[in-house]
Amino acid sequence: MKLTETEIQDRLSSLTGWASTGEAITREFVFKDFATAFGFMTSAALIAEKMNHHPEWSNVYNRVNVKLATHEVGGLSELDFELAERLNRLV
Amino acid sequence: MKLTETEIQDRLSSLTGWASTGEAITREFVFKDFATAFGFMTSAALIAEKMNHHPEWSNVYNRVNVKLATHEVGGLSELDFELAERLNRLV
Amino acid sequence: MKLTETEIQDRLSSLTGWASTGEAITREFVFKDFATAFGFMTSAALIAEKMNHHPEWSNVYNRVNVKLATHEVGGLSELDFELAERLNRLV
Amino acid sequence: MKLTETEIQDRLSSLTGWASTGEAITREFVFKDFATAFGFMTSAALIAEKMNHHPEWSNVYNRVNVKLATHEVGGLSELDFELAERLNRLV
């Protein structure tokens, strides 16, 4: 179910590091080098695959930019905040 | 050493799937699902780390977009074509 | 549900490369180098995590040894053969 | 160059969690789940590939057992302790 703007702001307020575009939430994760950045991506990939909810993400060396949205609802759903919370717990 | 436009076109002609923007070369790799796409990314990450030449890349589900350039030369170098060739060999 | 010896032999007959110890099935996968071996392991890890059925496995350079069993049944179950089949499809 | 037993004991004394068999050093790493265990393995794989010094290792769910040795010297070398130190820094 698509979250309302009020629901999004409420969830964001307790979610470190993430910002909302209204349509998606994004966070940049910065690591000390490529090996730790890609190790994070692999743990994140395993979590995403199990949830069957995949990020749109990019990487350059020690930086990983993650964008989460739920296409089925045309915006943000609880799934996005659940995945964001799990990714935060990895770092 | 920065490659000239002629050298770039010459190398591209024998490199399946890649295009040049002049400043970088790019290719989209498409897989059957997320598990195979991310397995490719992991093999690619290992090759890139060993060459100490890292891609700028993004992924959404079964798609991986790779962009290669050599910042030290302000354009493309032999390293980019060597990495591109190795990535092609993975698929 | 634990498979009988007859059921195990039946499933093994159509499963390339795997052998049974009665308690588990095993296969060694050999790749051209470490990068491709570990890329396979990552795809396999994603599949296993999604099935919530994890291998006992080891790796040395280009070799990956996989052992599958279902502890809950004290032997082999359909899950092991499903995962084995999916791993075979990766190579 | 092959390390002597005295050199091995000296290096082990400042290396948390590792034990020596004389021929190799080993450590078990335990994580909270498979996703974090395999993320560690991926970072470790990148480090190992760059050093061109690969572990003999196994994994079951949240446990990773690593064994390091240098076949070229028929025992342990500085490379093993360097890789062990880097793996320790990942956790």
Image: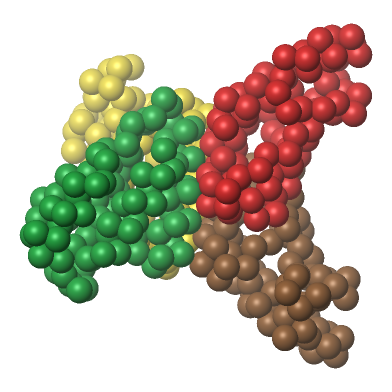
Chain colours: A red, B brown, C yellow, D green
- Does B70 appear above or below C72? below
Look at the image and tell me in which quarter the N terminus of chain D lies. Answer: bottom left
Q: Is residue B82 left or right of residue D56?
A: right
Look at the image and tell me in which quarter the C terminus of chain D lies. Answer: top left
- In the image, D47 versus C32, the foreground residue is D47
Residue depicted at x 66% and y 43%: A30
Residue depicted at x 70% and y 23%: A16
Q: Is residue D81 left or right of residue D9?
A: right
Residue D16, quarter of picture: top left
Q: Is residue C4 left or right of residue A2?
A: left
Tally the marks: 0
Residue B33, quarter of picture: top right
- Does C81 appear above or below A85? below
- Residue A9: horizontal and vertical position, in percent? 85, 14
- Does D44 appear above or below B14? above
Residue depicted at x 68% and y 39%: A29
The reply to whether residue C51 is in sight is yes
- In the image, C66 versus D2, the foreground residue is D2
The reply to whether residue C26 is in sight is no
Residue depicted at x 79% and y 70%: B25
- Residue A59: horizontal and vertical position, in percent? 70, 50
Q: Is residue C24 left or right of residue A70?
A: left
- Residue C38: horizontal and vertical position, in percent? 45, 54
- In the image, C77 versus C63, the foreground residue is C63
- Does C32 appear above or below C23? below
- Residue D58: horizontal and vertical position, in percent? 30, 44
